[in-house]
């Protein structure tokens, strides 16, 4: 276990005194270097975290929703030790150990195909589906006794249904047509890739900055570095939800102007972001259209997990087309993303290094995406030592 050093209220007040501010009531004359120093300081105060989140992304007619447990360890974005355990779907676990990305998935292996009659097909499509006799008989022939006590899991837009025997715990995927039924057995597969392939949108820290990704970073450029690197300045102070914030303008690359609202009362966290951009290419990605300008707004809701240490509890981002190049002249909502904590998130806890390692036998075959073939786990471990 790593030894954790938790920042006390005394240290927070000492930091505030050093920069002539109060965490509770910010002075109106903070300058940009003070804001940058505050962001950097409180970023470093978040050491680790673990808890369940729900991510929902809607863009046009498409909807993506994931429930998962996120575990991370490391005080900087470059120290990318991250684990995501999904509650359902074929992706089970993604791990980034700071060097490589390990992926654990559930795959399907065909067990058999059996012809069925129209009446059997109707059984599979009842409100409470039943396993047709030809399928049960074929299962027995291959040595499987499927009990009558089972549950079914289905996913939207998937032709497969997962039948789970409540007695044995064994599961099978059923793929029916009007003429035959395919039965598959699930198995666990492993994959390794260089770098980190975990979707950073699933990590609340991603939303606390702006998307200026670097090639080797898991998340993106930290907010304090964005403000240092690009032309930035404080425009004014504004009251948001009864709290004083500093409105900062950033001239980001590609001509994308940014407006950031930073709240010293909440540990110098980003509480609101606005930007506009033009879609420059023809694309099948509905509902984007070439030449149209879009307006994006992000609002972050925080919780004080420890004295003076604030972390996102909910993030909402909305997308509108602009009827003119004016943020006040917006069209109807076309996209919305929400990231929500289930309420059981823990911050700055001791995280075992075993959380970011695969606990599997050395001879387990792992697909190496760099070489395009499978290799024993033992060989992959040896190459990193």
Image (cartoon, rainbow, N blue to C red):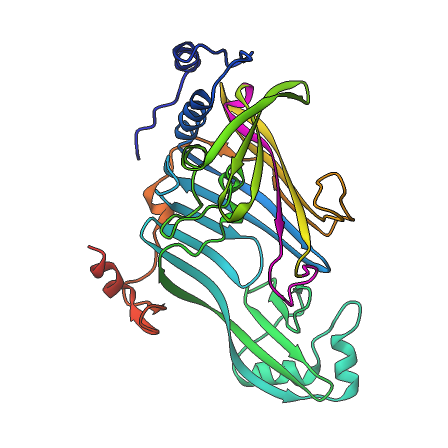
- Give, as a single range, the part of the protein colored magenta: 265-289
Q: What is the quadrant of the N terminus in the image? A: top left
Left or right of residue 250, residue 318 in this image: right
Residue at (39%, 41%) from the top-left corner?
A: 77
Numbered marks: total:
0
Viewer-proximal residue, 9 or 142?
Answer: 9
x then y, percent, for residue 18: 38, 11
Q: What is the quadrant of the C terminus in the image? A: bottom left
Q: Quadrant of residue 314?
A: top right
Left or right of residue 48, residue 183 in this image: right
Q: Quadrant of residue 325?
A: top right
Compared to residue 244, the image places residue 103 above or below, namely below
Compared to residue 137, the image places residue 221 above or below, namely above
Q: Quadrant of residue 193?
A: bottom left
Residue at (57%, 43%) from the top-left corner?
A: 53
Compared to residue 309, the image places residue 278 above or below, namely below
x then y, percent, for residue 361: 31, 62
x then y, percent, for residue 211: 50, 45
Viewer-proximal residue, 330 or 75?
Answer: 330
Left or right of residue 242, residue 89 in this image: left
* Membership of 274 in magenta stretch: yes
x then y, percent, for residue 31: 47, 19
């Amino acid at each position: 276990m790593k030894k954790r050093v938790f920042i006390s209220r005394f240290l927070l007040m000492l930091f505030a005194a050093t920069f002539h501010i109060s965490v509770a009531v910010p002075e109106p004359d903070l300058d940009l270097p003070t804001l940058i120093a505050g962001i950097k300081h409180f970023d470093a105060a978040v050491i680790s975290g673990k808890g369940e989140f729900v991510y929902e992304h809607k863009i046009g007619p498409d909807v993506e929703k994931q429930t998962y447990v996120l575990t991370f360890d490391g005080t900087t974005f470059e120290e990318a030790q991250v684990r995501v355990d999904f509650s359902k779907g074929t992706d089970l676990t993604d791990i980034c150990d700071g060097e490589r990305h390990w992926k654990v998935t559930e795959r399907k292996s065909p067990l058999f195909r059996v012809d069925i009659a129209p009446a059997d097909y109707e059984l599979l499509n009842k409100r409470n589906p039943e396993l047709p006799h030809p399928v049960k008989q074929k299962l027995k022939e291959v040595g499987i006794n499927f009990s009558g006590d089972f549950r079914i899991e289905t996913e939207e837009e998937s032709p497969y249904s997962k039948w789970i025997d409540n007695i044995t715990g064994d599961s099978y995927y059923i793929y029916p047509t009007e003429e035959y039924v395919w039965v598959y057995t699930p198995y666990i597969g492993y994959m390794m890739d260089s770098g980190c392939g975990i979707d950073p949108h699933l990590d609340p820290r991603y939303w606390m900055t702006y998307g200026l990704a670097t090639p080797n970073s898991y998340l993106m450029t930290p907010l304090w570095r964005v403000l240092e690197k690009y032309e930035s300045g404080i425009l004014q102070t504004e009251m948001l939800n009864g709290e004083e914030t500093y409105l900062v303008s950033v001239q980001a690359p590609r001509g994308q102007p940014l407006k950031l609202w930073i709240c010293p009362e909440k540990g110098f966290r980003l509480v609101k972001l606005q930007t506009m951009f033009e879609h420059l290419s023809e694309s099948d990605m509905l509902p984007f259209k070439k030449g149209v300008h879009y307006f994006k707004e992000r609002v972050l809701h925080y919780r004080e997990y420890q004295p003076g240490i604030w972390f996102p509890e909910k993030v909402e981002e909305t997308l509108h087309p602009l009827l003119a190049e004016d943020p006040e002249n917006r069209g109807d909502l076309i996209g919305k993303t929400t990231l929500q904590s289930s309420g059981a998130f823990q911050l700055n806890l001791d995280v075992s290094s075993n959380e970011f390692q695969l606990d599997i036998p050395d001879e387990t075959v792992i697909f190496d995406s760099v070489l395009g073939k499978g290799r024993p786990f033992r060989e992959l471990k040896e190459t990193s030592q």
